């Protein structure tokens, strides 16, 4: 095993240990509500980056996958009483199938046309949910979650820990994709799809795999959401803000490695959460826009690229 | 003068006690002066930003209470955050209000969809909350410390627009058409309306929902005419309300229609009243307050005298009849609970409101066991005699005549709709 992999696993163990211990040491539930949102965005940004960053296919439909996960989980829990881990698993499978279908239908088109097609997915799914009474339609659906298990002191802390586990799983998957043959193939697709195809890279299969993995992670991010808000309704579940953040966070953090989306999400989601309760939400949206423009103009490789260049310069 | 060691110790202890005394005394006084904190989330941005004029209601109430010496001798402090009209932001905001800001009283966000996420939270934590305009907001949670400031009344999910059907029944309506936007409030209104229509033995000849953002209603109006209804119940949002009114003007409606409207969001607000002007004549629509003689009191007049200049300055609805008075009412309910129970303990405050009725600027309010007003007081008003687009005419009586409830009635239904429209 490589040194970086050992360090990565050690980091994960520490983060998970902290995640299980913090709820017993930090008493104020507010931090777990905020922590949940930040971790949710870490997962979303990581999921988006598998297709958008590694393969270079800009997906505007992140909210569609997220919303699908939200509604599947809410439906399975309220109708069949499935426990949360099974709801999360089901959401991941559903997201993967949805990703595969979307990929099959849209991957023949590229660039801006692909982006528009993915945006259509959100509108289609939202309209479907609006018209299914079993999902509450436009009125939404109340989801009174189960009591938290004994190892967690309260519902907000339980949701936080579950989201942390999902985020860690998503980041591990993204890192695996990045360092394996899949990542190498996807990077070849991003550099030049035609050249990759000519060199024997199975581009369509790889892109479909990336769509499925990305869809699974995005849907998984939505699965605990009904238990966080206790209520789901289509406008929020399929909100374009989710899609916007899913793109902005990896672009700010860097799209080339797994660390980029994590950094971007930690930075942007934390600032958004703080700004909402301190300055104003209008300034919050303005801030996201300004930071995005600044990064695209001055650091197109994102934060991780910026750090990488500094370290490279320091070494030389 | 020499001091023994024992004397020196006594002197040191006395000096220390004397120095520490103001701190002890001071802290006691400080605790008594600690303000009562009232926390709320308001939709200052996003799709529900048109409801932000409610904040003026909260602020006027706070200023009035503080000018009168506060509650239980303590000042009142308002803590508000913008939920961006998104349910996703609500849980963290209310946790901040309770766990960080230590608010004693909570006001819910606006409407059912934003209030729903906070209901399990207040039930689990056993907190006191005044609900803001959430239809049937406590019907699922059934929390005994939740009270509506809005006049929906009991069984509001089904009954809040019953007044429209009572009027239709009074006109001998047998056939009714129902259309609604495919969104939360309008969908619930149409569903409840259909149930009441069936209860009254009316035949629903047309019942259709339409996607949000629909702008052309011509085919739908033709289909309604083909069904030959005597009443048309519409549950719509501002943009579609305008499009429907304009569509009816262009295409026309059957002379048999006796009553038209019901649950159209938009004609309650100054912007739409001013832009549509005389096109609104004849419309029968729901409202919460109109300046008719049966509703005007010095208290509510005083409220609007102060509301209007602030609203004009802030660029929000200058009339503000629909929402702001009930935000002030929310404050009055909280104040009554605190002063009546002489406490900020949720159980004591809730017990007081369950046991006593409260005088507010919107009249006397009594609550049932899940915090609904015991009596529904949603108004059905008919817009009449509107000339031109001057907004000031709506401040005078006679343009929004109350048809229902009977206790506040200021006129009879003018019909049929086409005749009332032309008047």
Image (spheres, rainbow, N blue to C red):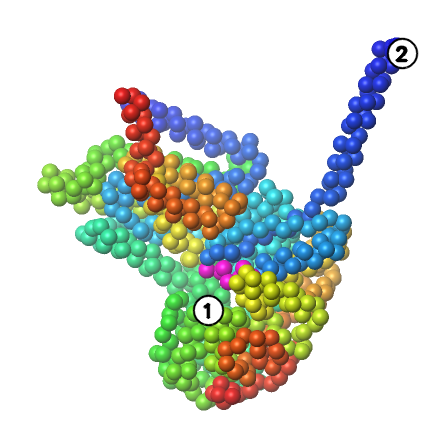
- Badge 2 element: loop
Q: Which residue appears at 73% of the width and 48% of the height?
A: B74
Q: Is residue B285 above or below residue A150?
A: below
Residue under pointer 1: B237
- Per the rendering, the mark at residue B1 is 2
Q: Which residue is drawn at 52% across and 63% down?
A: B315
Instruction: Assign a secondary structure to mark 1.
Output: loop
The image shows residue A68 at horizontal and vertical percentages of 37, 52
Residue A86 numbered tag? none
B147 in magenta: no
Q: What stretch is highlighted in magenta?
A: B47-53
Along the line of sight, which residue is nearer the eye, A238 or B312?
B312
Q: Earlier in the sequence, mark 1 or mark 2?
A: 2
In x, y percent, where is residue A307?
33, 30
> Measured along the vertical axis of the image, is residue B254 above or below residue A82?
below
Q: Identify the image quadrant of residue B115.
A: bottom right
How far apart marks 1 and 2 lie (CA) works out to 89 Å
Task: State yes or no: discs 1 and 2 in contact (Cβ < 8 Å).
Answer: no
- Left or right for A68, reference B409: left
């Amino acid at each position: 095993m490589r040194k970086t992999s050992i360090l990565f696993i050690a980091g994960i163990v520490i983060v998970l240990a902290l995640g299980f211990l913090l709820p017993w040491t930090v008493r104020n539930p507010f931090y777990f509500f905020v922590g949940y949102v930040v971790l949710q965005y870490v997962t979303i940004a990581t999921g988006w980056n598998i297709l958008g960053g590694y393969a270079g296919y800009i997906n505007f439909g992140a909210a569609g996958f997220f919303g699908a996960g939200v509604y599947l989980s809410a439906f399975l829990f309220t109708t069949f009483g499935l426990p949360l881990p099974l709801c999360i698993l089901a959401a991941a499978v559903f997201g993967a199938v949805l990703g595969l279908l979307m990929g099959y239908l849209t991957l023949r088109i590229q660039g801006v046309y692909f982006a528009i097609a993915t945006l259509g997915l959100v509108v289609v799914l939202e309209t479907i949910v609006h018209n299914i009474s079993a999902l509450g339609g436009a009125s939404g659906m109340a989801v009174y979650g189960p009591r938290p298990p004994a190892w967690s002191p309260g519902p907000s802390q339980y949701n936080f820990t579950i989201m942390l586990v999902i985020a860690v799983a998503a980041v591990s998957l993204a890192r695996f994709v990045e360092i394996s043959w899949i990542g190498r193939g996807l990077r070849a697709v991003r550099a030049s799809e035609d050249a990759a195809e000519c060199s024997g890279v199975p581009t369509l299969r790889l892109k479909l795999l990336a769509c499925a993995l990305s869809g699974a992670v995005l849907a998984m991010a939505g699965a605990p959401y009904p238990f966080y808000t206790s209520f789901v309704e289509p406008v929020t579940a399929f909100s374009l803000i989710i899609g916007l953040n899913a793109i902005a966070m990896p672009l700010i953090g860097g799209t080339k490695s797994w660390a980029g989306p994590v950094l971007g999400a930690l930075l942007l989601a934390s600032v958004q959460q703080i700004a909402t309760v301190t300055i104003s939400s209008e300034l919050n949206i303005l801030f996201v826009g300004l930071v995005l423009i600044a990064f695209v103009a001055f650091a197109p490789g994102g934060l991780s690229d910026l750090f990488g260049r500094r370290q490279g310069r320091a070494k030389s | 003068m020499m001091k023994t060691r024992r004397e020196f110790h006594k002197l040191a202890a006395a000096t220390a006690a004397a120095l520490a005394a103001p701190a002890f005394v001071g802290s006691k006084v400080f605790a008594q002066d600690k303000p009562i904190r009232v926390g709320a989330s308001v939709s200052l941005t996003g799709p529900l930003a048109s409801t932000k004029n409610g904040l003026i209601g909260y602020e006027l109430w706070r200023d009035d209470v503080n000018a009168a010496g506060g509650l239980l001798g303590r000042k009142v402090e308002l803590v508000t955050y913008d939920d961006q009209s998104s349910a996703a932001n609500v849980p963290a905001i209310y946790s901040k209000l309770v766990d960080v800001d230590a608010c004693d009283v909570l006001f819910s966000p606006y409407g059912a969809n934003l209030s729903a996420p906070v209901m399990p939270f207040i039930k689990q934590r056993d907190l006191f909350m005044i609900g803001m305009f959430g239809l049937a907001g406590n019907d699922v949670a059934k929390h005994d410390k939740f009270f509506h400031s809005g006049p929906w009344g009991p069984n509001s999910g089904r009954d809040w627009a019953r007044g429209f059907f009572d009027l239709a029944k009074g006109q001998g309506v047998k056939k009714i058409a129902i259309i609604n936007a495919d969104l939360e409030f309008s969908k619930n209104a149409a569903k409840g309306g259909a149930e009441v229509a069936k209860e009254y033995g009316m035949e629903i000849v047309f019942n259709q929902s339409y996607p949000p953002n629909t702008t052309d209603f011509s085919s739908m109006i033709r289909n309604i005419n083909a069904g030959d209804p005597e009443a048309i119940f519409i549950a719509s949002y501002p943009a579609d309300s305008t499009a429907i009114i304009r569509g009816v003007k262009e295409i026309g409606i059957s002379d048999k229609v006796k009553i038209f409207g019901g649950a159209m969001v938009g004609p309650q607000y100054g912007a739409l009243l001013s832009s549509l002007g005389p096109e609104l004549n004849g419309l029968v629509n729901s409202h919460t307050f109109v300046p008719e003689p049966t509703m005007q009191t010095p208290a509510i007049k005083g409220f609007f005298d102060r509301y209007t200049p602030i609203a004009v300055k802030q660029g929000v609805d200058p009339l503000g009849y629909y929402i702001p008075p009930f935000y002030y009412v929310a404050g009055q309910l909280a104040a009554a609970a605190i002063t009546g129970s002489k406490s900020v303990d949720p159980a004591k405050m809730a017990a007081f409101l369950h046991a006593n009725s409260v005088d507010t600027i919107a009249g006397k309010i009594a609550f049932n066991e899940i915090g609904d007003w015991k009596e529904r007081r949603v108004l059905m008003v008919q817009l009449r005699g509107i000339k031109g687009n001057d907004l000031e005419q709506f401040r005078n009586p006679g343009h929004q005549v109350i048809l229902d409830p009977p206790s506040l009635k200021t006129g009879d239904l003018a019909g049929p709709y086409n005749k009332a429209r032309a008047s």
